[in-house]
């Protein structure tokens, strides 16, 4: 099987099978306590506990429609649909030139290493818009490539030469470029002095507690303070001081070993680093990716990378204080006391939810460049009684050094007994209220097997379903409305499900119905109106458990009433991920990732064209504000 046939988690699992949960007593005990939990709180029937009392009260009293659109039906068509009164168009697609010396996308060759370095990267994911001095700049992650598409001009979708592999390396990273409106259409400003491609070869600095430690030293960098390249950048974040955060997710799949008999240390196994890569072939052209020769190189990936979108010469910084794991996004909040809080998910079955709290405080217009280098990392513990706490990952609590905590973060979080989660994807903080949401996308191992570190993943409060194929959105309220407080209370905003064919909890929560059902929530973001936008990366078969859900989609949720409406449906075999708004809020930008990942899409050009990831602009036909 190639990585094209499996998702990242399945591929990891094939290489490192997880232990099955066998502690029968514990399973029974958990089931009993869960019954107590549900029985005690579910006063209004299925779903009420999920929404919480305040939400249900608001719904009962009725409230004004905050959506500004009518819901659309599910779709299995190879295009994008938006509600009546809205229109969409493509802004940029994989392989579009950022400089005028680069050619337009070549359908026959799908580009070369050289052209890919001057064009928009592949599989765009998280993105942000920055504006300064009347100029508007996009920073967009280019997460990964689908080998069958990138190398679709080669036999079996495999690289034919070194240039093919380097094309793949250049398709990763991120794309930074200026845009401007021309005749009402958002257009790339080619040759802008702000345009930049960051790839697997871009020089970076390593900062924070792990910088300079032995864990990060390599033959190429005996100081352990620099690093080359970033890849598999999934979700994103923005700081109040105007920088972009690119989050390294499945960084492990790019390393392999020339010595197939090499003994893999437990620290590598925990992260899915092994002797085989996922088909990218990078070690064939660069020994950095050969863990038999450069084992510490793998410790130099898996971080949050801070990038200045206004200075293409600035060296990106890997902020080790924010921990090393399969980072989804980085939701940055300025707490009431001025400290910077960053909420982060680790997207793997049975891994954890994290929080970073800075030591220093934010100063508007001041020097904030070191705020993400010093602070405390925490992992979340959720209790079945709807309480929870942040467990500090300190040397005292974990028995690890500060550098070890920053590099082997998963092991530190296991040591303090954090709650194993159903694949935490994006975290979104409500700008109008001190509350935070996280998409827990799915977990077929819930109640069956634990994580790669041996932590069990029993059915519990925020992860209430065995073999969770639909996912849920949890939320928490920090104690005393203080994001730096260690205590919180939580509930579930939505339990995705199928009310038509599901049984019990698989029907979903009360706010899920046949008109809005979806699976595998992933991207989450609030707009300035306080609506929560939900993007999905799930099963698009539209059959059996997923019948009626159609292609991946984007919905909006009113977090006060709990109502959820479908806003956009994507083309075949895509994921909808990445969202941001134009400065005047009259355009919403949405990412379309990996259309045709199994060979059944010709989005966006149609006909027999190569499917290409891209960003679309969505506007109201009356030009009014959207979001
Ligand atoms: Fe790249 Fe967890 O999504
Ligand atoms: Ca994602
Ligand atoms: Ca996902
Ligand atoms: Ca993705």
Image (tube, rainbow, N blue to C red):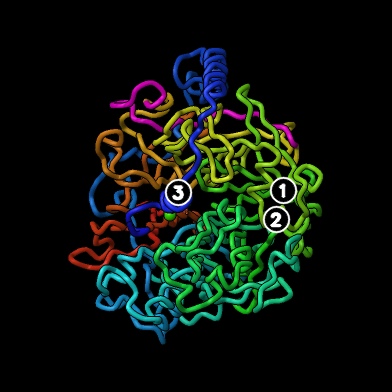
Is there CB contact under 8 Å for labels 3 and 2?
no
Q: Which residue is mark 2?
A: 406
Mark 3 against mark 1, which lies toward the viewer? 3
Q: How many marks?
A: 3
524 left or right of 399? left
Q: Residue at x 67, y 45 (%)?
A: 355
- Of label 1 and label 2, which has the lower sequence position? 1
**Between marks 3 and 2, how big is the CA–CA gap?**
24 Å
Query: Is ligand 1 closer than 8 angstroms to the Cβ of mark 1?
Result: no
Residue 247 position in % (x across, y down): 57, 58
Determine crowd level at label 2: few under 14, some 14-19, many 20+ residues with C-alpha closer than 10 A: many
Which residues are the magenta region?
486-506
Q: Residue at x 63, y 47 (%)?
A: 343
Q: Is residue 566 magenta?
A: no
Q: Nearer the viewer, residue 349 or 388?
A: 349
Q: Residue at x 69, y 41 (%)?
A: 415
Q: Residue at x 58, y 73 (%)?
A: 293
- Of label 3 and label 2, which has the lower sequence position? 3
Determine crowd level at label 1: few under 14, some 14-19, many 20+ residues with C-alpha closer than 10 A: many
């Amino acid at each position: 099987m190639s990585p094209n046939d499996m998702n990242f988690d399945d591929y990891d699992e094939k290489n490192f099978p997880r232990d099955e949960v066998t502690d029968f007593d514990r399973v029974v005990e958990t089931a009993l306590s869960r019954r107590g939990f549900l029985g005690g709180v579910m006063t209004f029937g299925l779903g009420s506990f999920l929404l919480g009392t305040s939400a249900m009260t608001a719904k009962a009293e009725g409230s004004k429609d905050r959506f500004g659109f009518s819901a659309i039906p599910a779709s299995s068509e190879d295009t994008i649909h938006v509600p009546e009164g809205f229109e969409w168009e493509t802004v940029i697609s994989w392989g579009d030139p950022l400089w005028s010396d680069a050619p337009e996308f070549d359908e026959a060759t799908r580009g070369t290493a050289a052209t890919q370095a001057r064009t928009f990267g592949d599989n765009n994911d998280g993105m942000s818009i920055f504006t300064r001095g009347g100029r508007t700049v996009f920073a967009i992650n280019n997460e990964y490539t689908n080998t069958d598409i990138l190398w679709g001009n080669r036999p079996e979708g495999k690289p034919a030469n070194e240039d093919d592999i380097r094309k793949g390396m250049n398709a990763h990273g991120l794309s930074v470029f200026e845009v401007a409106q021309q005749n009402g259409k958002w257009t790339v400003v080619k040759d802008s002095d702000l345009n930049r491609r960051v790839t697997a070869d871009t020089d970076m600095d390593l900062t924070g507690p792990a910088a300079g430690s032995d864990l990060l030293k390599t033959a190429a960098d005996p100081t352990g303070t620099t690093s080359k390249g970033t890849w598999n950048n999934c979700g994103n974040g923005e700081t109040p001081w105007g920088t972009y955060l690119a989050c390294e997710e499945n960084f492990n799949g790019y390393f392999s070993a020339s010595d197939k008999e090499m003994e893999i240390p437990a620290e590598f196994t925990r992260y899915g680093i092994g002797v085989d890569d996922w088909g990218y072939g990078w070690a064939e052209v660069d020994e950095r990716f050969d863990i038999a020769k450069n084992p510490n190189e793998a410790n130099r990936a898996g971080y949050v990378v801070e990038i200045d979108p206004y200075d293409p010469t600035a060296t990106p910084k890997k902020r080790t204080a924010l921990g090393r794991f399969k980072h989804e996004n980085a939701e940055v909040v300025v707490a009431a006391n001025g400290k910077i809080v960053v909420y982060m998910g680790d997207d793997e079955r049975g891994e954890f939810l994290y929080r970073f709290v800075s030591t220093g405080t934010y100063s508007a217009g001041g020097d904030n460049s070191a705020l993400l280098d010093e602070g405390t990392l925490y992992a979340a513990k959720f209790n079945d009684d709807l309480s929870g706490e942040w467990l500090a990952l300190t040397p005292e609590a974990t028995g690890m050094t500060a550098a070890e905590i920053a590099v082997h973060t998963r092991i530190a979080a296991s040591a303090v007994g954090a709650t194993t989660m159903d694949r935490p994807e994006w975290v979104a903080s409500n700008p109008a209220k001190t509350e935070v949401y996280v998409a827990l996308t799915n977990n077929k191992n819930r109640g069956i097997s634990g994580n790669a570190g041996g932590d069990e993943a029993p059915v519990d409060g925020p992860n209430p379903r065995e073999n969770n194929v639909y996912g849920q959105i949890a939320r928490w309220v920090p104690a005393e409305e203080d994001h730096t407080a260690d205590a919180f209370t939580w509930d579930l905003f939505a339990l995705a499900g199928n009310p038509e064919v599901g049984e019990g909890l698989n029907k979903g929560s009360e706010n899920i119905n046949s008109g809005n059902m979806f699976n595998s929530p992933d991207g989450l973001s609030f707009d300035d109106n306080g609506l929560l936008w939900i993007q999905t990366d799930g099963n698009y078969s539209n059959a059996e458990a997923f019948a009626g859900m159609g292609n991946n989609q984007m919905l909006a949720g009113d977090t006060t009433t709990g109502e959820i409406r479908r806003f956009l449906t994507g083309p075949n075999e895509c994921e909808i991920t990445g969202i941001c708004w134009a400065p005047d809020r009259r355009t919403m930008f949405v990412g379309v990732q990996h259309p045709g990942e199994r060979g059944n899409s010709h989005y966006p050009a149609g006909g027999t064209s190569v499917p290409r990831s891209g960003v679309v602009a969505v506007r109201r036909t009356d030009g009014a504000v959207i979001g």
